[in-house]
Image: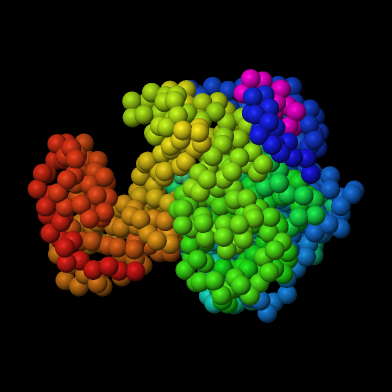
Amino acid sequence: MKIEINSLKDYQHEYEKSIFSPEEFWEEKANDFVWKKKFEKVLEWNFDVPVNRWYIGGKLNITESCLDRHLEKSSDKIAFIWEPNSPSEKSIHISYRELFSKVCRFANVLKNNNVKRGDRVCIYLPMIPELVVAMLACARIGAIHSVIYAGFSSGSLANRVLDAKAKIVITSDGAYRGEKIIPLKAITDEALANCPEVARVIVVKRTGEDVAIISGRDVWWHDEETKTTDNFPAEVMDAEDVLFILYTSGSTGKPKGIVHSCASYMVYVDYTFRNVFHCEQNYVYWCTADIGWVTGHSYLVYGPLLSGITSVMFEGIPTYPNAERWWGLVDKHKVNVFYTSPTAIRTLEMLGLDPITKHDLGSLKLLGTVGEPINESAWQWYHKNIGKRKCFIVDTWWQTETGGIVLSPLLNVSEAKPGFAMHPLPGIQPVIVNEKGEELKENDVEGNLCIKFPWPGILRTVYGDHERCKKTYFSDYPDLYFTGDGCKRDNDGHYRITGRVDDVIKVSGHLMGTAEIENAINGHLIVVESAVVGFPHAIKGNAICAFVVTYEHPEHPENLKKEILEQVKNTVGPIAKPEKIYFVKGLPKTRSGKIMRRILRKILEGERQNFGDTSTLIDQEIIGDILSSISDATLVN
Ligand code: PRX
């Protein structure tokens, strides 16, 4: 596999070229794909509108670069080794040829079910091969996939289906998750009661549970497959046609449907996959992310397939049936490159070394982490106990909106520093700004992280709301893309992400919007209003705390807490459940009605006196009131 960056000199060469001749640089990177028609121009952009158009005039279908082009030389090569939730069920090896055939067959199923180019298809599936097949089949026929994480509740599913204006949903009867079975079809039915436009539901049989089949709307995946063939010529797409929508939480309002388009997402994911993970053709690669999040899209599905690599795809959880599961799989499949999250690392660290020592992890060559800042002790544990001090660690920083990795340590370029995302990838021009929006050009500075030039993975818009895209990412600082993250650049010019600076919270690596959780809590009849903030948590990185104002003093606070937790679970999903709930008399608000979350965060950190400038608070007494109401409050899980 081609790897351009193999030394500091290579990196400097690539980086300089990408900055001084970006169009030439990205034209070269696009050459090896299957194009139906070569593009006429590499880039048109303006961060003010904003508009970002890449490979203008080019025609292609991404599945031809992911699948068809590998068939000649490596059709028998394994694309995915699928490991089921339970170790007593057999793993499945799917070759590139088999994957191609499954994708074409399901593309025909979609067509037979009236899905057309440009239609949105919501996919609400567990980590089973059909999830990958469904995504690629959408891409093959030119439909837009929108994968919804199977841990979301019916309310969250309904919101996303409605926002995407989808007429079709693909789900399964149920999902295995450790010892549990999640009734995905029943959750889908509940969600779709509020989505009258959905005319078709395709159901995968996974758990074999009895499920309601609504006549005229629901069909079984396996029945539909038998009605068709595995021949499906790829639809010719424009470079800028939408490939997928993926929802991510925002600091206000409903989740944003981040839009990525076909050609430049492909080029960027491919370039970053090759140069960050350094896989050789015979490597086995394992990204543990769920495909419901962007890491799964870019580095479990598209990136490895574009490179023709063999990947492990795992249905279950790291601790089922015991804490050895992951390490047993690394050993069994001789995994060479392993990519996971800091929360998973911390969870496994807590379980001690026994589960590791039973397995041979000698195949590992490179380790990765993503999704949230990694604390130094977790990094060291990962380096010592999993990497045996011989594996390079890539702490990759990026976002749903960036499409692919933006900052990362790079093998053979420099030593990794724990907790540092280190270098901008070629094409990335990071800028750190202070509160006044001034660029801090020197080293040893801290501020908000922005990017000043487009890269191919950049989002195109927020689905159906371009104004929101502009306001969220391109308005705080003129001519810059604002990431929403705080960042330091040290004396050596290396980058370290410090965390979110807006009202979203990273819980176990999942982005949670405070507004979304507050809306769920406020839906309880007895609740007047609420404010949600994050606080440091040893395993999850951050946990959620809710300050809740009720119409009357709750007679049974413990019962009310349980009801609120249930409400959040049903409206957003179990991952959004607060760790702590405090009932308070009021919230610290400014005259314009904005909640001063900073004060609540300080209270949680244990501060009792020094709250900085509180002059804009409408009610100066409120801090004292909150402190007295939480003094005897209890912790709930
Ligand atoms: O705050 C940063 C954090 O995750 C956010 C993006 O979340 P999401 O769109 O869900 O994508 C996650 C997977 C790419 C960022 O704004 N984040 C991501 N990676 C890191 C990180 N924070 C610190 N270090 C990282 N390596």
Report the front residue among 377 and 193.
377
Report the front residue among 38 and 174.
38
Residue 56 in the figure: left or right of residue 555 = right
Q: Is residue 58 above or below residue 165?
A: above
Residue 185 drawn at (x, y percent) = 56, 67
Image quarter where the C terminus lies is bottom left
Report the front residue among 458 and 485.
485
Image quarter where the N terminus lies is top right
- Report which quarter residue 500 is drawn in: top left
Q: Which residues are magenta?
A: 19-30
Q: Is residue 494 above or below residue 116?
A: above
Question: At 72% from the left edge and 69% from the top edge, which residue is drawn?
Answer: 332
- Report which quarter residue 486 is drawn in: top left
Residue 626 drawn at (x, y percent) = 16, 55
Question: At 34% from the left edge and 61% from the top edge, which residue is drawn?
Answer: 578
Residue 279 drawn at (x, y percent) = 73, 49
Q: Is residue 605 above or below residue 189?
A: above
Question: At 46% from the left edge and 35% from the top edge, which residue is drawn?
Answer: 490
Instruction: Find the residue positioned furthest to the top.
Output: 20
Query: Would you say residue 22 sits in the magenta stretch?
Result: yes
Instruction: Give the colour scheme shown.
Output: rainbow
Residue 75 seen from this side: yes
Query: Would you say residue 36 sits in the magenta stretch?
Result: no
Report the front residue among 290 and 359.
359
Residue 115 seen from this side: no
Residue 69 in the figure: left or right of residue 582 = right
Instruction: Find the residue positioned furthest to the right.
Output: 72
Question: At 51% from the left edge and 71% from the top edge, which residue is drawn?
Answer: 352
Instruction: Find the residue positioned furthest to the bottom.
Output: 88
The secondary structure that most of the magenta stretch takes on is helix
Residue 613 drawn at (x, y percent) = 18, 37
Residue 270 in the figure: left or right of residue 454 = right
